[in-house]
Amino acid sequence: MNPKYLEAIETASTILAEAILNDMEEALSYGAGLDRTVQHLSNAIGQDTLTLFYASISSHLTQQRQQEGWQIEHHPTVIFKTLFGPVTVESPYLQKPGEAGGVRPMRQIMGVEGNRYSEAVERALVDFGSEKSFERAAHQFREHYGWDVERGTVLRRTESVALLSQGYVQERLLINTSSSERAASAVNTVFVVELDGCDIRTGVFMSAAEAGFTERAPDALVRPIQWQEVRTGLVRPLDENTKRYVCLKGSYPQVCDQLDALATGQGVTPDTLVLSPGDGGIGRQEELARHFTHFQYILDLGHLKSHFYDTADKLGIEQKLQHRWVDGFIDQLWQNDVQGVLQRLQTLFEKTKHDRLRCLVNHLKRFAAAVDYGRFQENGWPIGSGEVESAHRYVPQERMKIPGAIWHPDTVNPMLALRVIRANDWWDDFWQWLHNERYQQMAA
């Protein structure tokens, strides 16, 4: 804190304490709730202080412009919404003879505009709106700051900032891939890179006729539900638990481009061994291998076991015997005898011609280099993809799959960008970036 404010704070605190203690019986009645009363009083002081501050700033900026030959054309007051509540601010509009247009210094210098919100309020709204439903976020704002905002206000501010957050994420990842300092100091160790997908419910309002809903009136407004896949990736050093995330509604190449940039920023080089546990989704192993040259895919053991159990069930093996049947194959894989497993399965297929066996054989052939579980465990490598499954719950789902949530397809990626910024602990840096961007625009 700036030392020059300390004396003023001490004086104001002394005056406030004396005012409260003037009636000792009332002060004692507050009990453990005294801090709430002080908070309400502090908020009132803050609101009054801002009113005085803006009045002085407005007068100062207006006088500066007048000294430059500008003349006051209009002298309106505006309501500007701050953390302490709405304050009334004088915001003169000035014109200069011979100049096209005019100036409004309070808006251009201080960002004060009628019925707008301060950056601190906007950040608070987006803090809550990026974590909870917009309705709950509005309630939480009122509980924290003591004045009301509408659900729609939280929605609009959160979605507006979310659109801007995509630019920040892109810029941050671009810096990762182009930084010569990062390349020079890259850490040549083992990294874990995981990627997986989940579905988010989306919908767009349209007429029943457009949606093909014959049971509704043609002009009735409906919102057909579509589930769209979003893909989450994470990067971390093998011997650390610090994770960084990407999340995007996009193709595997698009997501892997971001994941590659994120990994580069963490210290991954072409010589870095990258481990990637996964459930064997089509195209995932291949796309990751195109981005990371020193790459080891690891087929999630639990996922593979479920394939074996499903096959045993389809073959009609009694449930009490399924464990022994599955464990026999898995034990062979732990001994790195994948060819022996394939041979046994192929022999069984030749006898039964069961399609489920064919699928299992093809699946195991595709991931033959990814099931050496004994060696993986001996090296201390992960053999399950639980981390990225947890990342799904934490990054996209915790906010975007709350009960009743239906997202416009165009808002999915902006909201995911906000969630990534929070998950990666980039939140403070993002708001400073946003402030700088806006300041530069106002200065221009």
Image: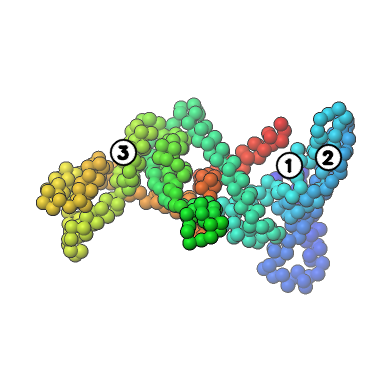
- What secondary structure is marked by label 2? strand
Q: CA distance from mark 3 to mark 1?
A: 52 Å
Q: CA distance from mark 2 to mark 3?
A: 65 Å
Q: Quick check: 74 above or below 440?
A: below
Q: Position of residue 60 (x, y in %)?
A: 84, 39
Residue linked to disc 3: 296
Residue linked to disc 2: 93
Q: CA distance from mark 1 to mark 2?
A: 14 Å
| Label 2 Cα crowd, 10 Å radius (few <14 / some 14-19 / many 20+) | some
Residue at image position (17%, 63%) is 318
Kind of residue indicated by mark 3: Gln
Residue linked to disc 1: 111
Residue at image position (56%, 56%) is 219
**Marks 3 and 1 in Cβ contact (< 8 Å):** no
Q: Quick check: 360 above or below 149?
A: above
Q: Quick check: 80 above or below 293?
A: below
Q: How many marks?
A: 3
Q: Earlier in the sequence, mark 1 or mark 2?
A: 2
Kind of residue indicated by mark 2: Tyr
Disc number lying in front (1 or 2):
2
Where's the N terminus, which quadrant?
top right
Picture disc at residue 377: none
Q: Position of residue 288 (x, y in %)?
A: 36, 37
Q: How is the image coloured?
A: rainbow
Left or right side of 152 for 79? right
Could you say which is closer to the camera, residue 281 or residue 142? 281
Q: Position of residue 128 (x, y in %)?
A: 59, 54
**Marks 1 and 2 in Cβ contact (< 8 Å):** no
| Label 1 Cα crowd, 10 Å radius (few <14 / some 14-19 / many 20+) | some
Q: Quadrant of residue 238?
A: top left
Residue at image position (81%, 33%) is 101
